Image (tube, helix red, strand yellow):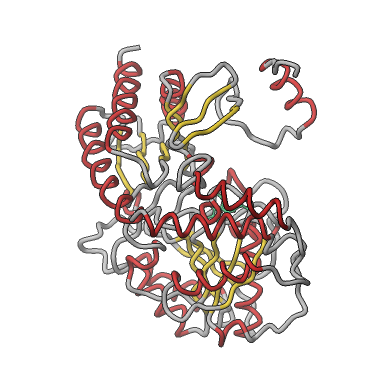
Amino acid sequence: MKEINREELVSKYKEFLMPQVHTSYTDPLCLEKGEGEYVFDYNGKKYLDFYTGIMVVISGHCNKKVTKAVADQIEKLQHTSSFFINKPVVELAEKLAKITPGNLKQSFFVNSGSEAVEGAINLAQLHTGNSTVIGLQHGYHGRTLLSRSLTALSVWRTGATNAPDLRYTPNAYCYRCPFNTTPENCDMACARYLEQVILTQTEGKIACVIAETIQGVGGLIVPPADYFKVLSKITREYGGLLISDEVQCGFGRSGEKMFAIEHYGVEPDIIAMAKGLANGFPIGVFIAGKDVAKSFEGPSVSTFGGNPVSSAAAVANIEFLSENNILHNSKLMGEILKEKFLELQDKYDLIGDVRGKGLFWGLELVKDKKIKEPAWEETEKIMQLCKEQGLLIGRSGFSFHVLRMGPPLNITKDRIEEAVQILDRSFAKLKYT
Ligand SMILES: Cc1ncc(COP(=O)(O)O)c(C=O)c1O
């Protein structure tokens, strides 16, 4: 077989894929294989993966249980369309009804997070009879017209963003509180502001509020304990449903709980999910209670939604999580990471804020801790320095100035040490160069 020439791969990628397909690093990384918490490039260089393909590979690369389930299914049946029933999708839907909070029970399967968000909103509008949708500032929901319009980060809104009836309400960005207060004395001003948005920018009734529980692309923004209690109360007072976008923070990423919203003592009316569900196989889904689901009896169809191979991967992945107590590991390893990140923050002025939960972490880099000017060039340099030393991390935030990290949830303490040492060396190198 012809040897792969990396330079040729990059040049053909640039020639035949659209320039809008963004790749990380000035010199893009071409990956050949993955094994557990590591990936390998075409020169055989090994990287510890703390980005997991944008928070997807929760059970490790090429997880044996998931691989076997997929291989078995591929031999049997690869596609049906949602016009016909297959066993893996039924098994998966039953599992999702068990692992989701409250009375969430019936699923609609699609292929991506963007589609799951769209479907969830459509259902909320049909159920309530209202059209207005409210999203959170700094939220990210995808790249279709509606999900892009709902995204409240200018860098991800290129192109038309004219989906109708959208409004935005403040998120709980405590490090840069728009109300200039602190979580101890704010009385949840940001969450309560939703009522002002409804009273002044809508006809007084809404279809839904859609919120990532922990904002990933927005910069790992973790709301305080009462945020969603206040937000959901106001949402329901004005006739709306609460949709949790758990595309990025779901499936144990936040530690101990399957879904991040479960840390907040509220039950959403609909959850949209994707990414980690099938450990890398394309899948998306939105789930609702029977009372909400029955508001749309169709017809509706998704050609690839409920694909038997992706569904079999998801079933195996969910089983792997519970058989190996992975959610608990996510919590424990997250506590260690937090401690280490706080030590790094003490050491390096560049780290303005350390935020996260479970194995979902962000380090907000600022040029000066008082002024908090986003240090986006430094963020890019740290990513590059980490890559050179064999660690993959991501970035996010309104100015790409937050280092974003999310290893597989079955990561061990040794690998955490390894990652933190590389980060430490990278910050040190940046400081003295
Ligand atoms: C919270 C959230 N919602 C929706 C999406 C869109 O998912 P997809 O890229 O699969 O369409 C993303 C993607 O990053 C996301 O983070």
Picture residue at 63% right of the left edge, 55% below the top: 310
Measured along the vertical axis of the image, is residue 403 above or below residue 229?
above
- 105 left or right of 160? left
The total number of labels drawn is: 0
x%, y% of residue 230? Answer: 36, 74
Q: Choose top left, top right, bottom left or bottom right for residue 301.
A: bottom right
Seen as rendered, the residue at the extreme top is 433
Measured along the vertical axis of the image, is residue 159 above or below residue 294?
above
Quadrant assignment for the N terminus: top right
- 405 left or right of 357? right
Q: Choose top left, top right, bottom left or bottom right for residue 50.
A: top left
x%, y% of residue 331? Answer: 29, 52
Q: Nearer the viewer, residue 221 or 263?
A: 263
Q: Nearer the viewer, residue 426 or 398?
A: 426
Measured along the vertical axis of the image, is residue 58 above or below residue 105?
above
Picture residue at 49% right of the left edge, 60% below the top: 246
x%, y% of residue 183? Answer: 25, 60
Measured along the vertical axis of the image, is residue 251 above or below residue 196?
above
Picture residue at 35% right of the left edge, 21% below the top: 426
